[in-house]
Amino acid sequence: LISIRAFAVAAAENLQRFAQRCVPPQRFLNVIGVLIAVCTAPLDMIAYSLAPQSVLAPFGMLSLVMNFGMAHIHGDVLRRRDALATVLVIAGSVICLFNGATSNEGPAPVPPTEALLFYAVFVSICCTVLGCVLAAPRKIGRRTDAVISALLAGTLGSSSLTASKILATSVTSHEATLASVAMACVPLPLLVPVHLFVLNRGFGRHPLVFMSPVIGTVGLLANV
């Protein structure tokens, strides 16, 4: 499931970048790219309800290979350091894959409320700071914009996965109640639209050979 999702994400990312770089920009293709990402998102929720994030997240790096191969279509320059960064991220993912936590034998328990609150506050502060820098009236450098966009997208992506896993855990838990499931549904509608906007903006402005490794690294670190 997670491998199918990785290839779908790569296709969605490349379609969004291609559509935004066309002259004139192809809004229809851009929307199709976003829809592919949205429609395949439930695969994440299912997969992450069955195995730990530290085990599954490395499979998302499959999209890096595809993005690297498609870079020439967008006219992106492939530098040696981009190739090295991609190799290092994939190598780190493989290490996490073989040394990650074991899969759950049954439904995982819902994390303690205190831990969830701490996580929510920490992520909210990080995303708010990064978002304010991007939205600030003053102009920032192109490289700085790319780095902040990738950091924000990676953090939001990890948060969306965490919210999906909490939702799946709440639904399958033996102690599930209507109130607990309803509360678990709240974060996703808030996170997903912002995440999609940040991704779409970043893919249109910056090369995927830069964005994908940084987003993948940030997401993987947050997942671990």
Image (cartoon, rainbow, N blue to C red):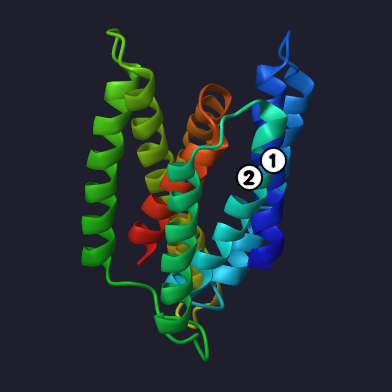
Left or right side of 42 for 90: left
Crowd class of label 2 (few under 14; some 14 to 19; many from 20; radius 10 Å):
many
Whole-percent x, y for residue 79 in the image: 50, 38
**Residue 164 in view of the camera:** yes
Query: Do labels 1 and 2 touch, CB within 8 Å?
Result: yes
Q: Residue at x 36, y 25 (%)?
A: 143
Q: Is residue 215 above or below residue 3?
A: above
Residue toward you, 49 or 158: 158
Whole-percent x, y for residue 195 in the image: 49, 38
Read off the residue under disc 1.
70
Callout 2: helix, strand or loop?
helix
User: Looking at the figure, which quarter contains the C terminus?
Assistant: bottom left
Q: Quadrant of residue 149?
A: top left
Q: Residue at x 48, y 75 (%)?
A: 55
Q: Amino acid at mark 2?
A: Asn
Read off the residue under disc 2.
67
Separation of marks 1 and 2 at Cα, in angstroms = 5 Å
